[in-house]
Image (cartoon, rainbow, N blue to C red):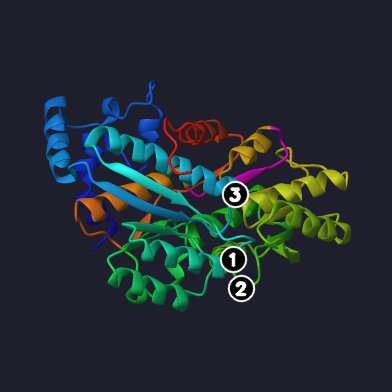
Amino acid sequence: MSNFEAISRRRMLRTAGLLAGAGVGGSLLAACSPNGDTEASAGGGDTATGASYDDAVKKIVNGKEIKVGFTPPVLSENFTQVEHAAWRRMSEYEQRFGCRWVWERQAPVGDFNAVQGTLGIVQSWVSRKFDAIAVCTGANFATVQSLYRDATAKGVKIYQFNQPAELYPEDQLQTVTNVGYDNRWQSGYLAGKYIADKLKGQGKILQIWGPSGSDWTRARKIGFDKALAENPGIKVVGEADGGYLRDKGFAAAQDLLTKNRDVNAVYGENEEMALGASQAIDTAALKHWDGSDGILTVGADGLVSGYKQIKAGKLTATVDIGGVDQGQNLIEAIFTSAVLGQSLTQFINNPTQVVDKTNVDWHQAYTEWALAAPKKYGA
């Protein structure tokens, strides 16, 4: 099934006012409504038709309780944004269709390498017969697919989010769907091309990557390397592991900048590391990019803290990986498959975009809209 077909199967949800933004930015339209309502921006179908649809879905839902487990690899600003966006969609479905959500969030203790904790968390929720489990993990592909297969056999549906699923053999995936984006072309390539364009194809850059062996690193590097191949005048003069953390990104950039003070750009594979690199530039008394001179600093995530640094001139740009859309699309996927019984494509990719001073305002406003979810779920 193509992405287009999958979107078409769920069109009635959006047309009736659910505007999930599954690859078409529908949630943005809802976010831009002055009062936060989605009904006015449904874009098609009259009120009577929408009410009739709602009533029909309510009969199917019949007050159903939906138990969902949400486990990111770490607790961070990025995954907080995804979770709050999910809460917005849950609140909407609860009000319109009468479903009742039981939401549990748990992340393994440690960093992105603490994968054993994720396995234990998922096993616990399977034993407690949750309806759906949403997973983002750095665990070994074969290991988690075996776990997911066991969960499915026991009636628990598994959904991955923010996962570099584009790297995995589709016929071996044991998930209902993978909600996210293509890390190669929707993140790594976009960042590399942006840097190359700003430097007009000539310059020296530093790279700060995630942990060794990370699938996100592997995927984003494919895209970034393609951008470099298209711009042979851009040279990588140093790279280091920043562990996806701000403090480690700072330490890595500080060491690299000591040896390479004449660089033109720093690429942090995620935004936390890029923000750490920005701090290292300040510490080294070097100049941030002003549009024509200084050091470009580019990351990827789409954090409110990052947007504020873009406005302050401390972060040049970031790739908004669509965390808000991921959270909303994740709940739509769970509702349509676990409650309505529809089938889904294995990949639901949302839009992404490079964000800099020219477009940061609406990205920040959209994310803050999600963070202001009207209801919180879970402990």
SS type, badge 2: loop
Are the residues tagged 2 and 1 within 8 Å (C-beta)?
yes
Instruction: Decide whether residue 318 is among the magenta residues.
Output: yes
The x, y position of residue 260, in whole percent, is 84, 59
Q: Dividing the picture into quarters, in which one does residue 159 lie? A: bottom left
The x, y position of residue 351, in whole percent, is 42, 48
Disc 2 crowd rating (10 Å Cα; few below 14, some 14-19, many 20+) is: few
**Residue labelled with disc 3:** 76
Badge 3 or badge 1: first in the primary sequence: 3
> Which span of residues is magenta-colored?
312-322
SS type, badge 3: loop
**39 relative to 286 in the view: left or right:** left
Q: Main secondary structure of the magenta part?
A: loop
The x, y position of residue 230, in whole percent, is 58, 63
**Residue labelled with disc 2:** 213
Are the residues tagged 3 and 2 within 8 Å (C-beta)?
no
SS type, badge 1: helix
**Residue labelled with disc 1:** 217
Q: Could you tell me which residue is drawn at 83 percent across and 55 percent down?
A: 254
Quadrant housing the N terminus: bottom left
**27 relative to 51 in the view: left or right:** right
- The amino acid type, in three-letter code, at marker 2 is Gly
